[in-house]
Every structure is written in C-alpha cells, then in structure tokens.
Image: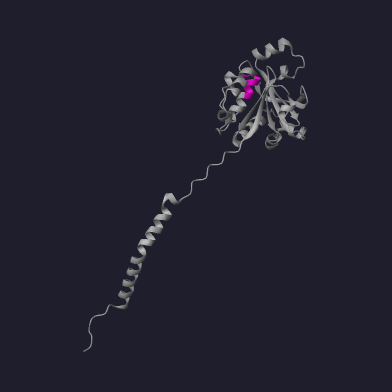
C-alpha cells in the first residue's frame, strides 16, 4: 500500500535544517560574542604620552629681566633679529623705555621721567651662542616649560611688539648694550605700572603661564613668582589667543 504520509516540502526541510544548525551554533556564537565584547578582554589603555614642551628661560639682570628663546622660535615668527644675526642659537629679548633703556649712562632723571611720563618702548634682542647659562654666568635664571601652542603665542607676541614702518618693516635702532644685538622700536609704551618685568610677565602669561603681571613690577618680584611655582605649575598650559597690544 502506498505511503501517503505527507512529506514536508523541500523549502520547509531547508528551514528546519537551518534552525537545527543555528541551534547547535547558538551557544558557541553567543559565548564568542560575549568574549569579544567583554571589557575584561581588552588590554589596558595605553598611557597618554606626556605632551611635548618647549623650554624658555627668564634671566634677571638686577632691576631688569629678559626672556631667552631658542632660535627656532624666532625663525618661525620672522623676527627681524633672525635675519640680522642668523648664526645665533638663542635670543635674549628685553623691553623698556626707549630713551632710558638705550642710554649708556641714563642717570636718575631719565629713570624718573620713564616712570612718571608714559613713553614709547623699545626691544633689545641679543644673539647668543651656546647654552643660555654660559652667556650669563652667575645671573639668576629660571627655565620655564611651555606647550607648543604657548610657545607659538610667545613668539608671535614678541614679533607683534615690533613697531613697523609704512612698508611693514621693523624699525631698527642702536646696537644692543652688550654682545651682538640690536634695539628695535616697540609699539608698547613704558610707564610706572608697565615696566620691563611686567612686560616679561605678560608675555609669559599670554603663553599660558599662571603669573600675575601686576605683581611683577621688579625682577625680584617676577623671579619669586617663577621660583614659587612647582614643576607642574611652571609648565604652561594652553590658553586662549593673546589679546592684541
């Protein structure tokens, strides 16, 4: 007698076989997915590399202070001294009253006038060869580490302090007081509350260092602020764009 038992259609057999196959593989697949997704299987996150820093130096000359930067920073921001003294490895930058700072023997009258009557400023840029410590042996000097963004702001800020003529060229003045260097006219004005040391503090603050320029009227006040910083505090953090002079 013929077997009339109804057989599943071929399509149904394929579906059933797939269900059985999936059923057999479901557990291993689920385990594999769990292992892949498990946070325990991920290796520890690599430590964030310490950000690269650029070291500049603040040097004290008694009443006066200056900033020393590597030649690469001057080159990157097209300082005029870089073209005039291209062999320098470092540059020391100071700032002050245009008449008083350039005078070889300024006397008390020029000093008093500079403090009481705001006058035009001047930059002194001195070319240095070799490490800064060898250029000024015995002078108090404080290294300061800046983030690259802060160092770029410092270089741009010093470049912007140069006064320009109608053709956009910096205005050179007399030779520097020592070494190979030159004075350049500055757009900023000197007065009792904006001394050379306040100028240095402002440049470093624009670079991201946590300083109080108003409390840096003298070189000693500035150096105490720098010396009182811990290594972490002495490393400048990125800050916003510098305000125009």
> Closest to the observer: 159 or 150?
150
Magenta-colored segment: predominant secondary structure: helix
Q: Residue furthest bottom?
A: 1
In this picture, residue 199 sits left or right of residue 26: right
In this picture, residue 46 sits left or right of residue 126: left
How was this image coloured?
one colour
In this picture, residue 9 sits left or right of residue 225: left
Give residue 1's position: percent from left, percent from top. 21, 89
Q: Is residue 185 above or below residue 118?
A: below
Q: Residue at x 72, y 16 (%)?
A: 100
Tell me if I can see residue 24 in this picture. yes
Q: Residue at x 69, y 13 (%)?
A: 111
Give residue 209's position: percent from left, percent from top. 58, 28
Give residue 18's position: percent from left, percent from top. 34, 70
> Closest to the observer: 153 or 146?
146
In this picture, residue 134 sits left or right of residue 189: right
**Range drawn in magenta:** 194-200
Give residue 65's position: percent from left, percent from top. 67, 21
Q: Is residue 13 above or below residue 132?
A: below
> Closest to the observer: 217 or 46?
46
Q: Residue at x 71, y 34 (%)?
A: 71
Q: Quadrant of residue 80?
A: top right
Q: Quadrant of residue 26?
A: bottom left
Residue 176 on the magenta segment: no
Q: Residue furthest top?
A: 109
Tell me if I can see residue 165 in this picture. no
Number of on-image labels: 0
Q: Quadrant of residue 64?
A: top right
Q: Is residue 30 above or below residue 140?
A: below
Quadrant occupied by the C terminus: top right
């Amino acid at each position: 007698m013929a077997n009339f038992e109804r057989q599943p259609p071929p399509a149904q057999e394929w579906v059933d076989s797939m269900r059985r196959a999936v059923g057999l593989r479901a557990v291993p697949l689920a385990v594999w997915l769990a292992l892949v997704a498990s946070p325990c299987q991920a290796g520890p996150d690599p430590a964030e590399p310490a950000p690269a820093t650029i070291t500049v130096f603040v040097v004290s000359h008694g009443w006066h202070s200056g900033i020393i930067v590597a030649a690469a920073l001057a080159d990157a921001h097209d300082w005029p001294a870089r073209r005039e003294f291209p062999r320098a490895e470092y540059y020391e930058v100071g700032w002050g009253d245009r008449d008083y700072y350039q005078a070889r023997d300024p006397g008390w009258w020029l000093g008093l006038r500079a403090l009481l009557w705001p006058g035009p400023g001047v930059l002194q840029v001195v070319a240095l060869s070799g490490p800064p410590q060898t250029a000024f042996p015995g002078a108090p000097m404080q290294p300061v580490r800046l983030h690259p963004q802060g160092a770029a702001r410092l270089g741009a800020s010093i470049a912007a302090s140069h006064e320009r003529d109608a053709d956009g060229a910096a205005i050179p003045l007399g030779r520097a007081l020592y070494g190979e260097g030159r004075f350049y006219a500055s757009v900023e004005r000197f007065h009792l509350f904006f001394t050379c040391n306040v100028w240095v503090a402002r440049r470093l603050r624009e670079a991201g260092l946590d300083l109080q320029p108003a409390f840096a009227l003298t070189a000693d006040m500035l150096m105490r602020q720098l010396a009182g910083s811990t290594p972490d505090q002495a490393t400048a953090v990125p800050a916003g764009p510098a305000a125009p002079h």
